[in-house]
Image (tube, coloured by chain):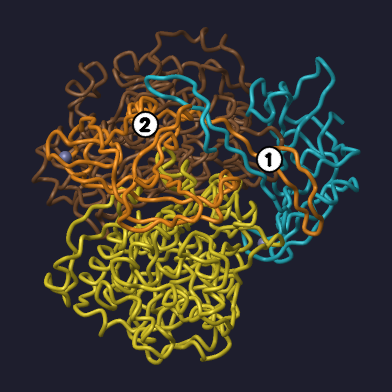
Chain colours: A yellow, B orange, C cyan, D brown
């Protein structure tokens, strides 16, 4: 990866349409790398739903707007993992020899529809025969998972609130963030319950915004950037769309785990994200990571809900299953912890413009690994100290798709 | 869509309505929805590997074989729950309501449904619940719901 | 969506309505749509490479620079045409209608619009056409249309 | 590629939902290759629009239905080129080393909405500010192109009708086809005008259906199939979404062309598909094809409209620009012509279930190159004699995306 850019994520941005958001993010990345649009050989676009855009084939529209007409392009969709999967697809465009430089860009303008309608539209991304007509919507599905996680492992609402406090607080130093907030655990606990145990301040935002990343083959990367970052490996997996269909089996183990740890755990049930674990396992294997707790220096995890961040600590192997609540309680994912998570605010506070999100994570990770946080965010406050390796992680549909990418400073 | 209602200028924002009638076929899942009207809650048993699905599924996701219909026990336990105070637009009039994942004895996977309780009752993991059926079919999965046993 | 109207059984088919209000912002294209109300048809000229766009575009697709607004000539020629006897649902009441791509002298790209003619007149490539503006703005691109010159 | 399958395409299929259609097509492919679902390492799904399905993240739903939960998957969208691009993405999954076997599958159930509403939904795949509100819909856009093609090159409605007669007639011998018809040029010319000069019988169908293709690395392919077919190369490109934005420049030349041929042609304007030409040029270059007229034995071209098939003859270089009408008139694309096109009926008569279409083409091309048409279609009637190389081609949004893949018998 040789450059990235993003727009300031906003609740409503009527001034710039999705195409212009993409262009703003791209102009930033081009300037940062000294590249011209003509240097880009093709693109992969990412957005979640036609229903949110009120425009179909929106990928092609942004493609010509930014000046890529006449070059290969296609759109990736995978729910909340859309951006993360598009980023991986751009990697594959290069790894397969199709292109030497590829732009991955993602966008979403979620302000076209109201919040309740937005919930409804996103809920149509669950089984339209069996789940959605119950009044199913995504906060409820994640809440069902959180309830069970609390039951299995003793995770508390207070621990969930700590994630919110951390991420909103981190965002105070991120000028791109939509909702920086200096809040307390009590503020979170007292915010209105949306779907028990998930409260308003446990939930990510709906945003208008875009992000992009320019990827290149190793050889070409060197000619554009003095500080490229290596996409070390990609991993992804899937699971059943319906929570009710999730199996009760055994944990796919990471190299630093053993079966004894989970003798009585029926996995994944609805407490954990099997696809997240499988995606991480694949990415770690390809990257040669045998102990993620020691080798990974930071992570951008998919915190659509605070509970999901806690679950992701476990899925990614940052701690054993069941220890996710304690992980945040012990401050290990804090900015000064041993594996800082969502240093820029995550989806909770940076924003969640669905198609853009996974690529936004890649850009933050890129800046962290380059050590250029001061340059892009205006201060060093959020810079992880000398990071060597980081991961980005996103998912869709309570884990129906998950993507984990390992990035390395070189 | 097509004609705009002016919402604001600078920038110019118009409101468009988009509406569609969807003909939604339950296709191979039709027996499940039909039988709810007869007070039967169908699950599926794989003819080949024997897996018993708590949510109707005409083909086995593990071995690919066709399944056969089976009656689920009408009594089960709450595997997880949530009470919704917000929702999507369509269900705005229904809040608050409680969703549960139900586990049935001897069945290998779960079933999602609504749980109705008396005022003051609280859902709990492990609580016994029993299926009820709507008298007038809506031809949706809401034709079955659960109450405390 | 959410509640079904029964269409047929075996298989079970229900009809669901899906409806959304879209707040559609013209965003950076707003000046084009606003100026139609003042009888101006705006195109864009690239400040950097000089390309002249017959369809408004705030940024140049060739060099990426910002463009500046320019008035298009109100008279042009038909570059291509089609007369529609069917359409999408929204425009069902409008058929038949004629769409044209208009080329303007000195302008590097085209503009799509409706062409209205007297009964019996037929569109032809190369025919001279002139822009007309709706008196009451609909805040859509239909606020401008063409007639034979 | 080691196996393929498809459902019978139908106008309405309420008995099988999109997931079951995918499974039917997959079961056929697995049986044909002797593979088990467990042998598939991951998948790429293809469908066009959430608006047509009434179900978002429909890729994930079919993924678990067919038994691929726990494996990598993602969805590709690119309008009418969706299936073609997904097929190429599956190729890249393997070429990039991510997987050794990959399933590409596509589906669409277009009967959920009425035909006029379907037109409306597909029309939202054009510029929602500038084009759609005019009453723009895709037949009209292609008609604008056809009108100009007739003006530039003298192409006639009769030549267009010949394409329809050919494709509907070919489909008479294809049991998978939705609309086999023994019709005459006169029947086509007398069918109701939809958008002049395009008539009802110049237009493809809207279908319910699915198709799938199993791809594998060369090494693995040999262990499953005695007759694999090589994906020789892939090419794709894009163009502006709005017809009005298409430039007036020069023709990107194929190796067997020279600038003298097109001295006075302003290209592409709205008469030709630049993205199709660029996609073909890329695919030919990578495949080492210097004269497509001599080296390509057959083609599955995107005949959403009869005019589009004629335009594609030229874009693909089967004849010079301007000679497309003559190409069909001379019978060169007929079953017994020198480059048979759409031997099984194309989109015109086989059907067009958008996400499935590009993959349906791949399956037909696969059977042709294997020489197994008799086995799969019940007779040898549509089998091209000893074909060595064929191409498949699809596009979106009047050529906003185009995909060309070269396949070779080995
Ligand atoms: Zn089974
Ligand atoms: Zn310019």
Residue A343 is left or right of residue B69, and the answer is right
Label 1, residues with CA under 10 Å away: few <14, some 14-19, many ≥20:
some
Q: Nearer the viewer, residue D217 or A287?
A: A287
Estimate the x, y position of residue D202 in percent, counting from the top left: 52, 20
Residue C3 is left or right of residue A394, and the answer is right
Q: Which residue corresponds to mark 2?
A: D17
Q: Residue at x 46, y 16 (%)?
A: D162
Q: Nearer the viewer, residue C33 or B24?
A: B24
Tag 1 secondary structure: strand
Estimate the x, y position of residue D204 in percent, counting from the top left: 47, 24
Q: Is residue A304 visible?
A: yes
Residue A404 is left or right of residue A265, and the answer is right
Label 2, residues with CA under 10 Å away: few <14, some 14-19, many ≥20:
many
Residues at discs 2 and 1 in contact (Cβ within 8 Å): no
Q: Nearer the viewer, residue D351 or A48?
A: A48
Report which quarter residue C31 is drawn in.
bottom right
Q: Nearer the viewer, residue A307 or A186?
A: A186
Q: Residue at x 27, y 73 (%)?
A: A322
Q: Residue at x 23, y 44 (%)?
A: D67
| Disc 1 within 8 angstroms of ligand 2 (CB) | no
Tag 2 secondary structure: loop
Which quarter of the rendered image does ligand 1 occupy? top left
Marking on residue B17: 1
Alpha carbons under labels 2 and 1: distance apart:
28 Å
Q: Chain of mark 1?
A: B
- Identify the image quadrant of the N terminus of chain D: top left
Estimate the x, y position of residue D298 in percent, counting from the top left: 31, 30
Q: Chain of mark 2?
A: D
Q: Are marks 2 and 1 on the same chain?
A: no
Estimate the x, y position of residue D387 in percent, counting from the top left: 22, 30
Q: How many marks?
A: 2
């Amino acid at each position: 990866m040789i450059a990235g850019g993003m727009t300031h994520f906003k609740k409503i941005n009527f001034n710039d349409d999705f195409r212009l958001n993409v262009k703003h993010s791209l102009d930033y990345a081009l300037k940062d790398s000294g590249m011209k649009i003509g240097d880009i050989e093709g693109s992969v676009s990412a957005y979640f739903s036609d229903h949110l855009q009120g425009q179909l084939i929106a990928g092609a529209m942004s493609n010509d707007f930014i000046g890529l007409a006449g070059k290969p392009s296609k759109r990736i969709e995978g729910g909340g993992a859309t951006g993360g999967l598009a980023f991986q697809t751009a990697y594959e465009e290069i790894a397969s020899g199709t292109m030497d430089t590829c732009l991955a860009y993602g966008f979403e303008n979620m302000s076209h529809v109201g919040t309740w309608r937005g919930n409804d539209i996103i809920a149509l991304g669950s089984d339209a025969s069996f789940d959605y007509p119950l009044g199913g919507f995504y906060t409820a599905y994640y809440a069902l998972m959180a309830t069970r996680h609390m039951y299995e492992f003793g995770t508390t609402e207070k621990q969930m609130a700590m994630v919110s406090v951390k991420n909103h607080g981190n965002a105070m130093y991120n000028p791109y963030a939509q909702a920086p907030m200096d809040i307390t655990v009590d503020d979170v606990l007292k915010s209105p319950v949306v779907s028990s145990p998930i409260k308003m301040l446990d939930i990510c935002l709906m945003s208008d915004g875009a992000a992009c990343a320019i990827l290149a083959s190793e050889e070409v990367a060197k000619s554009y950037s003095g500080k490229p970052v290596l996409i070390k490996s990609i991993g992804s997996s899937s699971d059943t769309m319906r929570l009710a269909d999730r199996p009760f089996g055994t944990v796919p183990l990471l190299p630093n785990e053993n079966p004894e740890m989970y003798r009585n755990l029926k996995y994944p049930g609805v407490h954990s994200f099997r696809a997240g674990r499988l995606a991480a396992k694949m990415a770690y294997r390809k990257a040669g990571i045998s102990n993620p707790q020691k080798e990974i220096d930071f992570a951008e995890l998919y915190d659509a809900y605070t509970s999901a961040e806690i679950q992701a600590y476990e899925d990614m192997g940052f701690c054993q299953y069941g220890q996710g609540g304690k992980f945040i309680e012990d401050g290990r994912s804090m900015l000064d912890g041993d594996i800082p998570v969502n240093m820029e605010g995550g989806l909770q506070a940076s924003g969640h413009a669905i198609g853009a999100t996974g690529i936004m994570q890649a850009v933050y990770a890129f800046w962290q690994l380059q050590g250029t946080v001061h340059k892009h965010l205006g201060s060093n406050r959020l810079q992880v100290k000398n990071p060597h390796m980081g991961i980005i992680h996103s998912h869709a549909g309570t884990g129906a798709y998950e993507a984990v990418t390992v990035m390395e400073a070189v | 869509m097509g004609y705009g209602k002016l919402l604001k200028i600078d920038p110019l924002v118009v409101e468009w309505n988009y509406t569609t009638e969807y003909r939604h076929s339950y296709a191979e899942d039709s027996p499940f929805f039909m039988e709810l009207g007869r007070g039967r809650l169908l699950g599926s048993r794989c003819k080949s590997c024997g897996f018993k699905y708590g949510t109707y599924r005409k083909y086995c996701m593990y071995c690919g074989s066709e399944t056969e219909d089976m009656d689920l026990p009408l009594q089960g336990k709450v595997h997880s729950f949530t009470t919704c105070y917000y929702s999507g637009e369509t269900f705005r009039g229904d809040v608050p309501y409680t969703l549960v994942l139900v586990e049935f004895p001897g069945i290998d996977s779960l079933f999602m449904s609504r749980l109705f309780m008396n005022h003051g009752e609280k859902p709990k993991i492990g609580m016994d619940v029993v299926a009820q059926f709507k008298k007038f079919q809506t031809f949706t999965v809401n034709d079955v719901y659960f109450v405390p046993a």
